[in-house]
Amino acid sequence: MSPRRIPTKGELLRLQRLYRNDRKIAEFLGGDVTEHLVAYWRRKKGIPLYSLPKFSEKEILEVWDRFGDDFHAGMELGISKAAFYNWRRRYKITRKPAALKLEQLSLELFTNNRSSPKRAGAGRQTIIQKIFAQRLGRKEVASGERYDIEPDIAMVDRRADVVLRLFHEYGITYVWNPSRIILSLDGAAGDDRAGGAEALKAIRHFARLQQIRNCLEIGEGDGLQVALEQGLVLPGQLIAGTGAQITILGCIGAPALVVGAKEMAGLWAQGKLSCEVPETIRINVSGRLPRGVLVRDVAHQIVVHLLGIGSDRRMIEFNGPAVDQMSIADRFTLCCLVASAGVSGAVTPFDATTRRYVNPRARRPFTPLSSDRDAVYAADLTLDVNTMTPILAGPNNACTVIPVEELAGVPVQQIFLGGAANGRFDDLKIAADVLKGKHTSADTRLFIQPASRMVLLEALKKGLIRVFVEAGAIVLNPGRSLEGRTAHILAAGEKGLTTAADFPCDGEGDIYQVSSATAAASALSGQVTNPAGRVRI
């Protein structure tokens, strides 16, 4: 019997934030781990008991009377819905606020058919509708209406060279507002074709001429990751961006609309974007992820379902207890991958997790928004993740998902781990835990690409890069383009696994999208492998 592995201090702190007490942590770790053993580990590592924030009965009652809803009241105090409910129960606050009682009374008096469809309007607006209405100075807007609107941020994440050429065709010398423009040079000139260097030179010159301060150099990494790390994007803002993966920014409650190069050039020139208010599909994710199943597996299932019902040009809003428990890195992955379903954007709710991430990074005040309780959605879907298993998407398209077990044992020649969807520290840590002290298969090439310079520095500091190099992996520069392309060149008959957000296969082989856990486990065996027995989450 192998000796029990003692969790690190960082792992215990993360578990404590999730489960709060030693008994639940012990239940999660399973085996013969007891509550007293967890307490012993805590004391040895200098971790105190989890202490909840203290709120008086007056504070809880005041917030409850204002919102009448555990979720929104908890968000106001920076705690979860369940935490606010517990505080309310502690003070025996069970009555509904008086304002809500009057509202319910008026509905009973004046509405004969309670099952009649909800009317979109004030008090029944989604996040994206609220943002449009706020910028237009209106109380509400309806989905499908077209407006000329000025977004808070115009981010060019892909093909800045094309946007620049189209902007010059307007004959305008200066952009509308350089402080609201973010340029990412990682992928700004497309692939590494001839002329790419000249295009990058022109973009850098243009940024200096226009005094665009937020011009993110190639060495910084993936522009979307860097924009979040540096607090350039904040909750409640409306983002317009090129590149399908701009939907990523919704992971902090900042809906981002995908626009074309021509629309972006017009925005640079005129300061307005003509677009429709997108309909919203709400997806409630419930349950608890089984061992070996990551958010990436959930996202693939969601994409297949969205493609089946038709989600083109619609906004996706994620909710549910499983989403509440996700880290920002997990929400990043979730909002990134749904882009392959052709959506207009994606957003997760602003909560205590978002607040903890954004507050240290924010460069200016921000006002988060949330959907009304009675918001009208184009569709309302629920996904229970309790019985999910690790899956693959592909080959070479996101329309098909296959349980990992069905392809278990199939040889894999090349694996790419990193990029836009899974290149953050949390993803690399999962892979490093699987690879530590082992070596990849001699028949499989493993490429690792951190999403940004900051991710790379943290991985270096925590020893992850050493683990990868000792395991035989090839570590690439931060980002998601250029050098990363070499990790997707497959010969005829070869098979590859990738955690990239798309299927950039430059050869003739088959490529499947997988989670970072499946990628790392498969790299060790040289064949498609279920990670359930190799990971602790």
Image: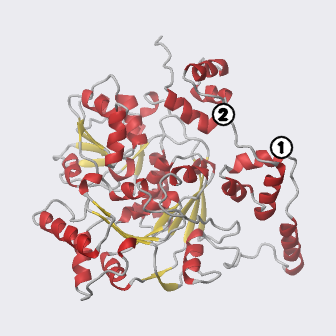
- The location of residue 394, given as percent across then percent down, is 35, 51
Q: Name the residue tied to disc 1.
A: 90
Pick whichever, 191 or 213, lies toward us. Answer: 213
**Whole-Å distance between the Cαs marked 2 and 1?**
18 Å
Q: Amino acid at mark 1?
A: Arg
Q: Amino acid at mark 2?
A: Tyr
Identify the residue shown where x is 57% and y is 20%.
41
Q: Name the residue tied to disc 2.
A: 50
Pick whichever, 206 or 467, lies toward us. Answer: 206
Q: Dot 1, how many residues are within 10 Å of its Cα: few (below 14), some (14-19), or many (20+)?
A: few
Q: Can you say whether 99 is above or below 356 in the image?
A: below
Identify the residue shown where x is 49% and y is 61%.
250
- The location of residue 330, given as percent across then percent down, is 48, 48
Circles 2 and 1 in contact, beta carbons < 8 Å? no
Say which element carries label 2. loop
Q: Earlier in the sequence, mark 2 or mark 1?
A: 2
How does the figure colour the protein chain or chains? secondary structure
**Residue 383 horizontal side relative to residue 211, left or right:** right
